[in-house]
Amino acid sequence: MSARPDVGGRDLLIAAALQAFAEEGIDAVSIRAVNRAAGVGPATVHYHFGTKDGLLDAVLAHHGDEVVAGVIEEARRLLDQGSATPAEVVRSLTHPYEEMLRAHRESGLRWVKVIDQLLRRDRDRVSDPETTRIRSEVARMAFPYADEADIDRAIVTSMQLFVTQVAQLPAESVATTQALEDTLADLEFLTDFLAGGLHAALSRGPAF
């Protein structure tokens, strides 16, 4: 193995780090281990990302940009609609995760496992200001009489529960088309369950 950095190894490093962070835990994985798993030179992470934090940011963006764009698109659709039910509020946040899993399967599931770790210890790191703002606008349509702080707390709690449940799924749950469809059906049920909880906590009207 060459001691020189591999200038073309960026994607290999992201894939290797994503798998290692998901399976072993972010703190347990060293830069050296990522370089070794990617099959590149020992200076390659530093060449492409500078630090382990820089590599982690790239891992977060790997599927995160897609999920954030999906959340914003769903929220804008509801805002244009001018109304939202509790189920629509929750689904606007969970559906982009489901679509990401449909598109990326094993890689997508690993990414959710990394997100789950960060939600437990460093929530601000995975917060997107535009997503936070627009999801609050949507939620206020569904719960016009609820306190804004209660809305934000309820939304964050619902999403953390959703991500944690997805992160606990085994790799087999997305390994085949049928397994993936069964998993997505279960996640739709979970979304409805969370919508019911959101309604119970915040709304005075019918849940659906």
Image (cartoon, grey):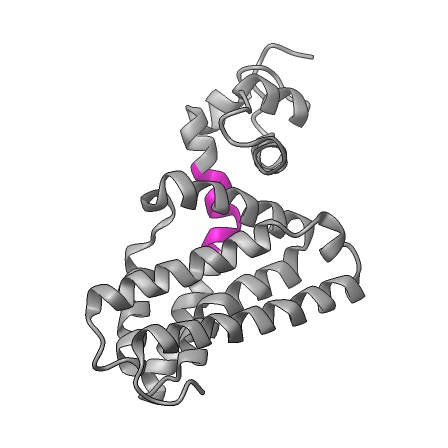
Query: Mostly what secondary structure, the magenta segment?
Result: helix
Along the line of sight, the residue nearer the viewer: 163 or 69: 163
Along the line of sight, the residue nearer the viewer: 172 or 103: 172
Residue pushed farthest top? 3
- Residue located at (61% from left, 52% from top): 108
Quarter of the image with the C terminus in it: bottom left
Residue 82 position in % (x across, y down): 31, 88
Residue 161 position in % (x across, y down): 47, 57
Along the line of sight, the residue nearer the viewer: 198 or 90: 198
Where 197 falls versus 40 (above or below)?
A: below
In this rendering, the count of numbered labels is 0
Could one spot residue 68 in this view of the protein?
no
User: Is residue 117 one of those drawn in magenta?
Assistant: no
Could one spot residue 199 in this view of the protein?
yes
Q: Quadrant of residue 80?
A: bottom left
Residue 8 position in % (x across, y down): 60, 30
Residue 92 position in % (x across, y down): 44, 72
User: Is residue 61 one of those drawn in magenta?
Assistant: yes
Quarter of the image with the N terminus in it: top right
Along the line of sight, the residue nearer the viewer: 127 or 72: 127
- Residue located at (45% from left, 26% from top): 52
Q: Is residue 142 left or right of residue 100?
A: left
- Residue located at (36% from left, 59% from top): 156
Residue pushed farthest front? 200
Where 96 falls versus 2 (above or below)?
A: below
Where 74 falls versus 130 (above or below)?
A: below
Residues in magenta, as a range: 57-65
Q: Is residue 176 left or right of residue 147?
A: right
- Residue located at (64% from left, 21% from top): 40
